Amino acid sequence: MKRSVLAAGILACALSATVSISRPALAQQSKVGDWTIEKRAQDTHCNASRGYKDKDDENRDYVIVITYSEQAIVIVMIYDGWEWDKVGEILRADVGTDDADIMKKAKWEVMDKTTVRGIFAYDQSIMDRLAKAKRLTLDFEDDEDDSIEMQIPRAGEALAALKFCEENRK
């Protein structure tokens, strides 16, 4: 009995030492509400991400990831209700927030069955509109069924934390 308790204690210490050694390599991470702000080891830039289930939409999963640099703003949207056929296909969608249009006929690339990615030239006015928004909409050209409205509460705080992360990334 004493040996099994001792062995369990040694194993727990070894595991915690392994976790604490490897953890810094995984991510530099913080939370803003239900947003995660992080700089992962494999990424060049910091990301702000938020995922949720929408009970009004068959409890489907919604995820948004935003990252930026001096050159570009990248927005990835994942929705498990999408069933895109062709990876790499370029779609066109109007992008908007609660009260403002951001872009008409913006290019979105299909990344997989449930994911699209938009890469846009950096424009502070886009960041400002996102910061004030409570939701982000994609209205796909000729495709009402795949158009989406994603909830982005506290986006301003998340983007401020993203900016801080980006300015202090290693």
Image (cartoon, rainbow, N blue to C red):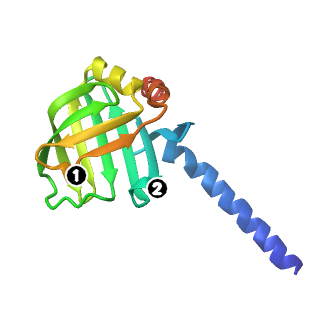
For residue 55, which numbered disc appears in the image? 2
In the image, residue 82 above or below residue 164 = below
Residue at disc 2, secondary structure: helix
- Say which quarter of the image contains residue 102: top left
Amino acid type, callout 1: Asp
Residue at disc 1, secondary structure: helix
What quarter of the picture does the C terminus occupy? top left
> Residue 30's x, y, as percent?
55, 37
Residue 156 is at least partly visible in this image: yes
Which is nearer the N-term, disc 1 or disc 2?
2
Residue at 19% across / 58% down in the picture?
84
Residue at 23% across / 34% down in the picture?
95
Residue at 41% across / 23% down in the picture?
132
> Residue 141's x, y, as percent?
12, 43
Asked if the residues shown at circle 1 and circle 2 are in contact, with their CB atoms under 8 angstroms apart, the answer is no
Residue 45 is at least partly visible in this image: no
- Distance from Cα at disc 1 to Cα at disc 2: 18 Å
> Residue 66's x, y, as percent?
36, 36
Task: Kindly identify which residue carries mark 1.
Answer: 146
Q: Nearer the viewer, residue 143 or 158?
A: 143
Residue at 44% across / 30% down in the picture?
155
Mark 1 Cα within 10 Å, few/some/many (few <14, many 20+)?
A: some
